[in-house]
Image (cartoon, rainbow, N blue to C red):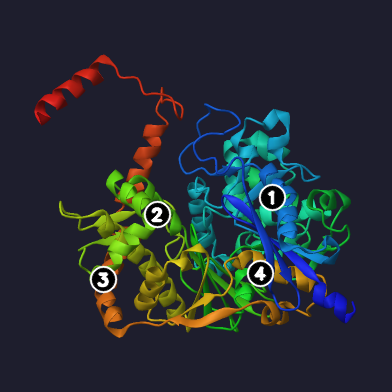
């Protein structure tokens, strides 16, 4: 490639999120983002019913998607991003992708998703299980118990716990709840690898998800003997449905096929990078690959990733994988299952109409109004402590049967009080993770934030004050997509490796927020209360959260339960009870 061509060369990064896919066109020479486009998934997240089969209710804790929505991102967002960038498609030399994880697709041998087969179109287990599908907690519990009972060495690489979000728990759930779908499933594929398969025609498992989500350590998966002890029918799971060629991060998975070139408008034969995870691929986008730099990708959930020079066992971490973030280093991962999701739930469902009306009059969002009012408070003024477990706990407890809690409510508590307590709870959750790493000999020296929540300046300062760390922010608003673009550039040969690509194309604003000593001291007192609640409800002091989950499941499974959206009939007894209640109130 001559100098003129190298200056024109661009790559495309595609970030597959929970609700949409984003494509960005990036200049290889300096990482300049020239154009982007977003395409929302038509079916979004199916967590109450299969949208294609109205009336068929899904059990609690399910989260499914339709894989055809992912292909539509290639058809819509990629050409739109290239057009917005105003570049010649001929100058695109590579494409890279990232995905939420662990998001699993059951397919036939040629990669056809089972949900696209007529006989399985109405079967929930034939669809994509999104990362936040937590209905396999029972299977995860059995995997953990058996691993500890047998002294399996690999369990320590995952902080002592396998998550219900991961490949093996979800796969075991399919076997035990729909054996016919399991038998028809010839590949159990991470969506990160499935989309690369669609781009290239080649199935290559990426080293990131294989290690963090697929229990692939030191060149091996759990043994067939272990799997058979879980369920005799599970013995061949790895050999028959999981095991496949593994590609290293930044390497070329293949080249763009004629079919995918027609979808995207990109040149056939350009490099396609090995797939990756949205969080892990963001570290090079922030040029934060050194030991001690913990990257927190804050969106609907938060994933914490960092590199280390040595192997350590961190209690409750999601995993440690050699080459899991960048080749040659131990990549550590932890996370919080709910962050932005919690704030969104609260603003949408727990705030009175008068707040929404005021926000509308002022031309701001409900979040902005709540943040403004919360920021006007003194630390501790609301008298509340919250637990940020509305989507369970990913680290350090690794228990998705846990649930949210707000303690200290009175009749004078206002919406902004609870909102601030929830913001603080997520910061306390991050501090718990940071302290777990430090206690295991993997110190965190800098917190680097990426994701949509970094726009909330009050929240960012709160995190700096709570953690006591300098907080840097990624310079890009599209961190994962930029990270995928960096991997595409490396796969295309424009940079020798991911570290070099990160140095040329990634960037962050160092120490954009620094801790306030007085605020940090006052937050220490609140954090001490958070840790007491954390350990009481999360480490066996009380099992009430688990019991409530069980009661809910039993109630939802009761005969005669109305389908989603169906009106609930009110019988004579119910009408009489309502009338008696009205009399008492009056």
Query: Label 1 vs label 3: CA separation?
Result: 44 Å
Give the percent coordinates (x, y) of residue 46. 54, 40
Q: Are marks 2 and 3 in contact (CB under 8 Å)?
A: no
Residue 526 image label: 3
Q: Is residue 149 visible?
A: yes
**In this image, 76 relative to 330: left or right?**
right
Identify which residue, 537 or 20, lies in the foreground. Answer: 20
Q: Secondary structure at mark 1?
A: helix
Residue 483 image label: 4
Give the percent coordinates (x, y) of residue 271. 83, 65
Query: Label 4 vs label 1: CA separation?
Result: 18 Å
Which mark sits nearer the N-terminus, 1 or 3? 1
Tell me if mark 4 has few (under 14), some (14-19) or many (20+) residues whose alpha carbon lies within 10 angstroms of its own.
Answer: many
Query: Label 3 vs label 4: CA separation?
Result: 36 Å
**In this image, 511 relative to 126: left or right?**
left
Q: Residue at x 65, y 62 (%)?
A: 209
Give the percent coordinates (x, y) of residue 254. 84, 61
Mark 1, residue position: 73
Q: Secondary structure at mark 2?
A: loop
Residue 363 image label: 2
Which mark sits nearer the N-terminus, 2 or 3? 2
Q: Secondary structure at mark 3?
A: helix
Q: Residue at x 88, y 51 (%)?
A: 258
């Amino acid at each position: 490639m001559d100098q003129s061509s190298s200056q024109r060369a661009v790559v495309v990064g595609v970030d597959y999120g929970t609700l949409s896919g984003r494509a960005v066109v990036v200049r290889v020479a300096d990482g300049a983002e020239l154009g982007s486009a977003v395409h929302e998934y038509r079916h979004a997240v199916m967590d109450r019913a299969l949208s294609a089969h109205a009336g068929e209710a899904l059990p609690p804790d399910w989260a499914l998607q339709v894989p055809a929505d992912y292909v539509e991102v290639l058809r819509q967002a990629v050409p739109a991003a290239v057009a917005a960038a105003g570049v010649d498609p001929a100058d695109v030399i590579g494409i890279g992708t990232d995905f939420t994880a662990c998001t699993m697709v059951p397919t036939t041998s040629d990669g056809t998703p089972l949900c696209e087969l007529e006989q399985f179109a109405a079967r929930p287990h034939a669809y994509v299980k999104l990362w936040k599908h937590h209905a396999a907690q029972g299977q995860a519990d059995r995997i953990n118990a058996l691993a500890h009972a047998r002294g399996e060495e690999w369990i320590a690489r995952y902080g002592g716990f396998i998550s219900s979000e991961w490949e093996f728990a979800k796969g075991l759930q399919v076997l035990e709840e729909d054996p016919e779908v399991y038998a028809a499933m010839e590949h159990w594929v991470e969506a990160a690898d499935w989309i690369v398969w669609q781009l290239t025609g080649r199935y290559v498992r990426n080293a990131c998800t294989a290690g963090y989500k697929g229990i692939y350590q030191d060149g091996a998966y759990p043994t067939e003997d272990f799997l058979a002890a879980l369920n005799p029918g599970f013995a061949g799971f790895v050999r028959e449905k999981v095991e496949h060629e593994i590609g290293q991060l930044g390497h070329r998975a293949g080249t763009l096929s004629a079919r995918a070139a027609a979808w995207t408008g990109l040149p056939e034969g350009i490099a396609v990078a090995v797939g990756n995870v949205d969080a892990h691929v963001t570290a090079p986008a922030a040029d934060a690959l050194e030991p001690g730099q913990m990257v927190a990708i804050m969106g609907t959930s938060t994933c914490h990733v960092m590199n280390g020079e040595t192997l350590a066992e961190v209690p409750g971490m999601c995993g440690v994988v050699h080459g899991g973030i960048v080749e040659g280093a131990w990549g550590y991962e932890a996370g919080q299952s709910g962050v932005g999701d919690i704030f969104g739930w609260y603003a949408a469902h727990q705030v009175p109409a008068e707040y929404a009306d005021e926000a509308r009059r002022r031309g701001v969002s409900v979040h902005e109004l709540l943040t403004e009012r919360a920021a006007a408070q003194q630390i501790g003024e609301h008298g509340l402590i919250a637990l940020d477990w509305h989507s369970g706990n990913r680290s350090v407890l690794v228990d998705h049967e846990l649930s949210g809690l707000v303690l200290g409510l009175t009749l004078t508590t206002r919406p902004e009080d609870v909102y601030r307590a929830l913001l603080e709870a997520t910061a306390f959750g991050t501090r718990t993770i940071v302290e777990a790493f430090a206690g295991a000999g993997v110190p965190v020296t800098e917190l680097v934030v990426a994701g949509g929540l970094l726009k909330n300046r009050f929240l960012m300062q709160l995190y700096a004050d709570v953690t006591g760390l300098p907080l840097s922010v990624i310079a890009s608003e599209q961190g994962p997509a930029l990270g995928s673009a960096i991997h595409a550039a490396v796969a295309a040969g424009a940079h020798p490796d991911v570290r070099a690509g990160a140095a040329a194309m990634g960037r962050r604003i160092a120490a954009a927020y620094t801790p306030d000593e007085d605020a940090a001291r006052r937050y220490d007192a609140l954090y001490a209360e958070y840790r007491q609640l954390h350990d009481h409800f999360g480490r066996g002091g009380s099992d009430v959260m688990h019991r409530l989950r069980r009661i809910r499941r039993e109630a939802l499974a009761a005969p005669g339960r109305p389908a989603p959206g169906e009106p609930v009939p009110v019988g004579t007894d119910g009408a009489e009870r309502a009338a008696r209640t009205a009399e008492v109130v009056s």
